[in-house]
Image: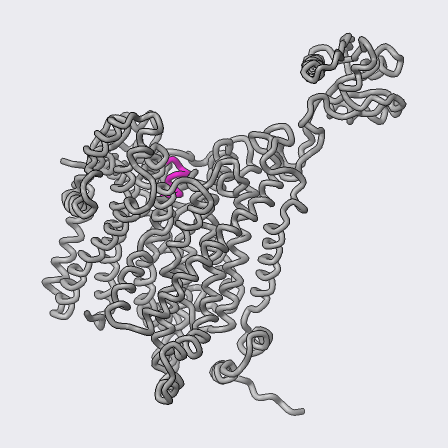
Amino acid sequence: MHPLLLTFLIFGVPAAIALVYIFVRGTSAMRRYIVTRIALTVPMVIILATLVFFVMRILPGDPVTSALGPKGSPEVKELLRENLGLNDPLLVQYGRFLGNMLTFDFGESLIGAHRPISDELGERLPATLELIIPATAFALTIGISFGTWAAVRRKRASDYGFRLYGVVSYAMPIFWLGLLFQLLFGVVLGWAPIAGRIDALIGTTLKRETNFVVIDSIITGNWAALGSALHHLILPTLTLGIVLSGVFLRLTRINVIETLQEDYVTAARARGIRATTVTYGYALKNAMIPVITLIGLQVAILLAGAVLTETVFSWPGMGRYLVERISSRDFTAVQSTITMFALFVAMISLAVDIIYSLLDPRVKY
Amino acid sequence: MATTPARTEGHDDFKWKADLEGIGFVRRLLMARRWYRADWWFVAISTVMVVGFIVLALIPQVFAPFDPREQVGPRFLAPGERPDVEVLIASAASDITGVADLASEGRVSVAVVAGEPSSEAVRNEAERLTAEYRAQGLDVEIRLRIERYETLEEALAGVIAGDAVVAVGSFLAFADLADAFPELDQMGSVAPGTAAQSFTLGTNQIGQDVLSRLIWGTRVALIIGFTSSLFSLFIGVPLGLFAGFTGGKVDRVLSVLMDSLYAFPGLILAIAITAVLGPSIINVIVAIAVLYIPTYFRIVRGQTLSVKESLYVEAARSIGAKSRVILTRYIYPNVIPSVAIIFSVNVADAILTGAGLSFLGLGLDPSTPDWGIDLARGQETIQTAWWMITFPGTAVMLVVLAFTMMGEGLMEIFNPKLRER
């Protein structure tokens, strides 16, 4: 099975089951919302793809010249241009670009063995997901719990401490945080490896099924590989997670503070309900509604952070692939990778909106 | 004794909201603390930092001890480490100041320590200078007679005894012995460009001074931060005003476009733009400017929409004010304070993105003194040289912190309710 398709199935099947469940059990308003929201994803994807396409085309600079360098002869350039379809009218190229996107046929790499881009992305996408999923989980745990804590203990020492954490982690360049972790835990203390997804020797023993190293090692029962993979995950996850957690912490804190000032909270307190019940049972649930949306908007920070984290830790994901292919001037690979990122953004925002509609049934289109 | 009634938070809340309406910029800043205990020291500290960085960026040559692009010392020197270079040691009474002065002395005897690199260094230096003189058409030759000694102490004693005119030895070893030979002076390093001085923050792998690059890096960072933010401001604000004020189809199209741009990961778009445009500081500025247009657009549009509905705009309209007048006299002044706040935070974001781009090796010429480039270089030698990544990263963090804190502080003072950027 194609690796890219497999990755989509791993995430798509559970998502589809959940969606069907909501659809069957949910109210009619919810059903209408979900249908509308899915329909609205189409123009969003098209706009993002168009953005990518025109940024890559309209700007000055010739992909063929940059791929072949100054030494390429005019005939070779012309041939390559013809093969890439760059001689066609812009609209034809645009239509073909959208069509190819639907079938995930991104063409072939301009360099090296000229492998199909979709094969290469199929190897890279799981690596990126394997990095950002634990990082997001970490960031959500830290951000929401400490954000609530800071809001409850507002204007006290712990609140200032958490706020400082939020501000500093926001200001800290993520690649620098990664470098500092490498320096401290990798070089000075020697606790964790500083590059790659898995130990090279152990990696050769691992049978690649899904390209998710953790999943592969579990389904093949290769525990040494699992240990190595988790060991390699520690530092990149912490790096990406800490930077994200600062943002989540700030968002949670502000919204919980606002919710705690609502009348119904005061009313609940007046009736003598325990403070923890009021905070976690009443306020937090409502405060989470805007937080979910705002967290969904942070996917930009997440992906940009993933690109930098992957570069620092030599993590063979999509971000590092993008940077590598830019330096080797592989135009098709760059365009396809950015398109994949755009699709990713659209999917996340769809998922966030659906979760939002579950939490807040008032939302309507 | 009169007791002051305990003021409830709600009462305070009401009071400053009422007072905030008719008051000017400076008074608002000063009164904010009294009203609602706004963290205005936040603003004070960050303003000092911002001004400091701007001064550094304007006149780096005053603060930087060396040229950031030149090799000024040995490679990989740790912060404060005294480099061990070969120095020329001569009697304090002699007028020798360097190897070049040996030319007039005929065949001079030089005391060296056996087995140390000093004899080779001084020989090479003499050959190099001779070749230089020849190239200038002068018939001058430095001819050395090397006298070997077992230790530097013996070599120095040899100079005092008159067996050799000068001695060549390790700088660090001589520093230990200097007190024992008060009649000798160290004349300077044998090879040019490797002065026997230490560097406050060390040197990198090509012998550039880390501190000087740090200071000059301020200029690059602030140029990128300010110009790109100004670009996005000058595009985003008018577009936001226009879209919010006219509404209708134009507004809807612009909003959808800007929302898509906003949702897209900025760094990745900037990577794409710089990859297509090619490396130069202008292209980095353009790429970053494009990313932040939606930030201004969204805020300005939202504020325009709400101000447009206010009573005084309606009043102005009813007495026949033209759209242009309403836009420039009524709406624009209400939108500007929040634009100033976003600008400050935006500069921080732009600096962060710019550093990220150059860390990835995109956008800037590798010789530019830039923090991102220095960090990328530092990563190559992370195993041995901790100082090469520690200091540029701290600089990025402090600049970003200063601008963010200033923005947040101002936001809290001017509009405590406006929190979402």
Q: Which residues are magenta?
A: A307-314
Which residue sits at x=44%, y=67%? Answer: A151
Q: Residue furthest bottom?
A: B2
Q: Is residue B241 left or right of residue B223?
A: left
Which residue sits at x=36%, y=67%? Answer: B240
Residue A257 drawn above or below residue A129: below
Which quarter of the picture shows residue A270? Answer: bottom left
Q: Is residue B166 left or right of residue B255?
A: right
Which residue sits at x=21%, y=46%? Answer: A90
- Magenta stretch: helix, strand or loop mostly: helix
Measured as percent of width and height from the top left, residue A45 is found at 21, 53
Measured as percent of width and height from the top left, residue B53 is found at 59, 53
Which residue is at the front of the view, A173 or A196? A173
Which residue is at the front of the view, A129 or B70? B70
Q: Is residue A309 magenta?
A: yes
Q: Give the quarter of the figure containing the N terminus of chain A.
A: top left
